[in-house]
Amino acid sequence: MTRPQVIYLIAVAAYIMLFLMFSRFFLWKRYSEGRYWRKRPHLTQEILTEIAEEKSRKLPYFSVLVPARNEAQVIEKTIRHMVTLNYPKDLYEVIVVTDEKESAESQRQKSGIVASAMEFLQSGLSGLRQYPSVEQKTMAMGVLSELAIQEYRTADVNEHAWLMPVALTRDDSWRCRDIILTLTQDLLESRGRLHIGRLYCLLRRAFPSSSDIEIARLYPNYLCLALPVIAAYSELTGQHNDRYLYSIIKCTTQANHKVTQDLLISFTNLVTRRVLAVLREKSAASELSSMCEDLYTYCFPTTQTVLERVQSQLGETHPVVKHVEVPHDYDGLFPGMCTGEMVPSTKGRALNYALSRVISDQTDICGFYDAESRPQPGVLLYVAHKHITNTVPVRI
């Protein structure tokens, strides 16, 4: 055989080998489903209660522990998933274990970030342009988003409330601000070419109970608020450019007609001038610093602040959600003690602290998940069924 033929055969053999290595996962999946997973019993809360009564056993009480440090981006979704597990709500609790060092570090950085954000905002207002750091940019966008929302909710606008969506006029400011902040950051990173599907995903997470029609009515309003924030930020950095706004309007808002584009540009410039005017007023009145301090926890949330907000929103129909914070000097042993010296953070250390201090006296079974876990809705039913039907004690 010639050299090209040898190379070709080697390449084909490599492709076949890679294909077989990839196919084995499907074979293992089929094997495991046939031998194990499909043998799971069909369970509901009613069926499990009947089985427990037949066995003269009570349904076990679960304590689900979630150690979370620097998980502000995912902890809300995790907790909202955990409280919807398919199990009687009075028979399990969710315990989130955070670390004191996270909140302490956030407070330590607060004064420096607020001061640098103030420097950036004031230098931009005075015409001294500078390229902001990531912290300055996030803080500035948060301030501008808040001012845009306040402008949207002024007395003049409220007189024409029929023009405004309820979500923007009556909903919590933190939700509106969070959506606008995320949207503006995504638009800046994508240079105005953000796919419309990203907007739907963002609003779907914020308003999970809303229909597609309601989402379609919401996103233009948030886009109209994001445009002045981007324009004001560009003005502060000395990069204001109508061509950039036209690009956002054409690609993201899908406004292809010149008249529509001009109207949106006019609206954006009008609101932008008002936002910058209010920013100057607050800077002159020495109110900008307090505003930055108030917005700091929204711009740089910790796991603790997100969890506190989620706890306040959960109703009585949900299981108990507990929050415990591990001291910085806890030694990590069971039950352990505080040593007075900084101790490195580990998941085992967090679990030992929670197990020795906050689990309920009713608890029969403990389990834990990572902060990014999304267990199957019926997982507690299967574990409880195993616990009830076993004739001898087992470790689960």
Image (cartoon, rainbow, N blue to C red):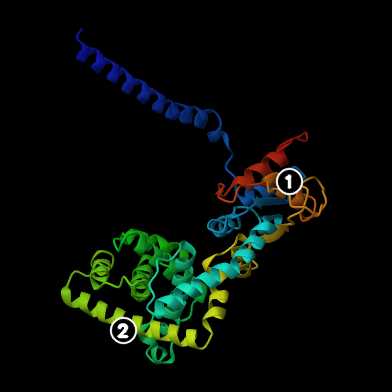
Residue at which label 2 appears = 270
Residue in view at x 52 percent, y 67 percent = 299
Left or right, 200 with reference to 80? left
Left or right, 29 with reference to 333? left
Dot 2: what SS? helix
Residue in view at x 39 percent, y 75 percent = 128
What is the crowding at mark 1: few (fewer than 14 residues within 10 Å), some, or many (at least 20)? some
Q: Nearer the viewer, residue 190 or 136?
A: 136
Dot 1: what SS? strand
Left or right, 348 with reference to 132? right
Residue in view at x 77 percent, y 45 percent = 56
What is the crowding at mark 2: few (fewer than 14 residues within 10 Å), some, or many (at least 20)? few
For the question of whether residue 265 can be seen, the reply is yes
Place of residue 304 in the rendered image (x, y in percent of width and height, measured from the top left): 63, 62
Q: Nearer the viewer, residue 3 or 62?
A: 3
Residue at which label 1 appears = 365
Q: Of all residues shown, which one is farthest toward the top?
A: 1
Q: Amino acid at mark 1?
A: Ile
Q: Quadrant of the N terminus?
A: top left
Q: Are marks 2 and 1 in contact (CB under 8 Å)?
A: no
